[in-house]
Image: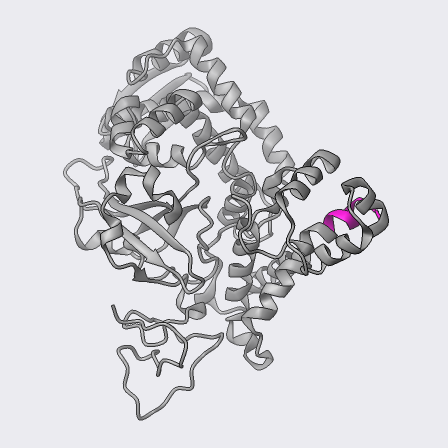
Amino acid sequence: MLARGMRLGGKLRRLRQDNKLTQVQMAERLAISGSYLNLLEHNQRPVTVPILLKLAEQFRVELTAFTAEDDSRLQAALMELFADPLFDAHDVKPAEVADLVVSTPRLGRAMLALYQAWQRTGQGDPGHAPAGDAAGGDAAVPGHPAQEVADFVQARRNHFPDIELAAETARREAALDEGRSLHGLSEHLAKRYAVDLVLRPAAGMGGARRRYDPRTRQLAIAESLPEPSRAFQAAHQLALLSQRGLIDRLIGGAKLTSDEADMLARRALAGYFAAALLMPYEPFLEAARASRYDIDALAARFGVSFEQAAQRLTSLNRPGAAGVPFHLLRVDRAGTIEKRFGGSGLAIPRFGAACARWALHQAFLAPGLTHVQLSRFSDGKSYICLARTLVPHDRPGDLRPRKALAIGCDADHAPSVAFADGLEARAPVAVGSSCRVCDLFDCADRSAPAALSRPLLDENWDGPSPFAGPRPEGTRAGRQ
């Protein structure tokens, strides 16, 4: 989605500087005057669609390079960084952070890398460790290996065309039937790679769901897994056997900073291949649009799990054939974010915990039920979100939900999404990203004081939370 109301002058100026052009030279290529280009670069005139198209033609840049998504994500990450008590004395204002993102985003990403490197020395606040989401840019930001991989996937908008093509080829070679993939995968592994697929009791798997022995060429999968999960595990192993060169080439281009990050990226890309194999792009996109992104219907149609179908929706980002842009998160019962993708533009916190008012956390209060929420942030953006607990299948008899999954999109896409039906009659829930940067000062769910734009606390004022304070004029009410 092209930026709406965003200042694009900084992006335009960086493009000119990267191409080593003067304003006069660039203006000539865009067929505008030098004075008009100067106004554009200083945000005194809007960058119109004709100019964007001319930029794409003359400089061979994707229009997505001029979206608000990466700027919003970087701004949210820097807001959290400056919320650290380390910067209290500097009184950094949100408007100053926004100016930094627009004018010098590379400097902003460098500050994130420096801050994370400082945390790794052990001097940072251990309770304020990186949780990980991309802040824009192509190179991985050094930090926790899982965060590096999340940044790698986010920078490519969770879309890997080479893997999509390889999966389509493998699907034809294996002659897989829609919704009945395990048998076909077993035969393909045996004939093409001399690998025997066997099901074993969970008790004999040593806690593993999938275990491949290169010496005996035997792939063991826990029989406690449901059929969709068995097929996904088989497809995952097929990726490691057949696409090693492609996967390693993609990882090499990511410039990750540790062997552990490389391993996690290899797992992520093998999982991407498995999803693309079981849910081929064009048929899945067509079915998604026809069902209005009904995740249960898609899971039944393609013989996959709810989580697998939901995650596949986040990868439908092929230029010219894209689906609704979704974000996705998975958390454990302690609230730790284990999986994330911010395709909708939602600012997922990099540091600390996510807002307790997100529907994702509420799912644990009523396991097995689907929770749908319309949320609104202080910047005026609204999102719709579906959350549900995930029942484990790797331990027979243990049906307690240990994970919860949430998928959502910008509220502008509500007419295209089935789970948004009826939400227009509900009042939106006021939410934030995380407590440190949220302006819901009197929120009963606040678990940390607001660092930026903090109110003056009053010892004679007792709020709904120990960290709450009087709500300054012009800020949002936290109680709903």
Observer-nearest of 148 and 416: 416
282 is higher (above) or lower (below) than 371: above
Q: Main secondary structure of the magenta part?
A: helix
Within the image, what quadrant is residue 114 found in? bottom right
210 is higher (above) or lower (below) than 78: above
For residue 415, side relative to residue 263 (left or right): left
**x 56%, y 24%: residue:** 162
Image location of residue 267, percent across then percent down:
47, 34
205 is higher (above) or lower (below) than 113: above
Observer-nearest of 448 and 422: 422
Q: Is residue 20 magenta?
A: yes
Image location of residue 401, percent across then percent down:
21, 46
**x 40%, y 81%: residue:** 472
Image location of residue 127, percent across then percent down:
43, 67
**x 39%, y 20%: residue:** 283
**Bounds of the magenta segment:** 14-21
